[in-house]
Image: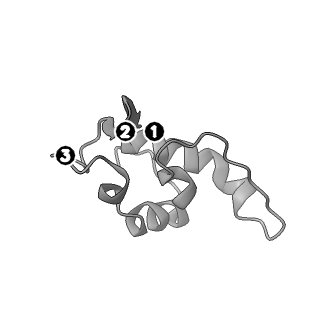
Amino acid sequence: SAGLLSSARVELALRATDRACYVSAKSETPYADAPSAIGFEATISAPHMHAMALELLAPALCSPSCLALDVGCGSGYLAAC
């Protein structure tokens, strides 16, 4: 995790969401810490970027009254986490 994860909840969310389901079937390294193709000349961000985003969003998303609107999420991976 390179020190990016401080929340057990974020780590569990990332581990529970299989990144291979969100990249192109042709991807040989869906778990590498690098962007991967998702088709249509678009990429999914590297896992460390998702970890950083979730760490920043966790305080707001983990409250009982939270609402989130993810517009243009690309692969849908971050929203699934």
- From the top left corner, tell me how far across and down residue 48 is, in percent: 40, 42
Please, is residue 54 above or below residue 81 in the view? above
Please, is residue 33 above or below residue 58 in the view? above
At x 70% / y 64%, what residue is drawn? 62
Q: Is residue 33 left or right of residue 74?
A: left
Which of discs 3 and 1 lies nearer the camera? The answer is: 3
Q: Are marks 1 and 2 in contact (CB under 8 Å)?
A: yes
- 3 or 1: tag closer to the N-terminus: 3
At x 53% / y 60%, what residue is drawn? 80
Q: Which residue is mark 3?
A: 26
Which of discs 3 and 2 lies nearer the camera? The answer is: 3
Q: Are marks 3 and 1 in contact (CB under 8 Å)?
A: no
Between residues 7 and 12, which one lies in front from this camera angle? 12
The residue tagged with tag 2: helix, strand or loop?
Answer: loop
- From the top left corner, tell me how far across and down residue 69 is, in percent: 73, 50
Q: Which residue is mark 1?
A: 49
Q: Residues within 10 Å of mark 2 (few under 14, many from 20)?
A: some
Task: Tell me how far mark 1 sits from mark 2, CA to CA.
Answer: 6 Å
**Toward which corner of the image does residue 65 lie, by quadrant?**
bottom right
* Residue type marked 2: Ala
- 3 or 2: tag closer to the N-terminus: 3
Direction front: furthest residue: 40
Task: Tell me how far mark 3 sits from mark 1, CA to CA.
Answer: 22 Å
Q: Are marks 3 and 2 in contact (CB under 8 Å)?
A: no
Between residues 40 and 68, which one lies in front from this camera angle? 40
The residue tagged with tag 3: helix, strand or loop?
Answer: loop
Task: Tell me how far mark 3 sits from mark 2, CA to CA.
Answer: 17 Å
Q: Residues within 10 Å of mark 1 (few under 14, many from 20)?
A: some
* Residue type marked 3: Lys
Q: Which residue is mark 2?
A: 46
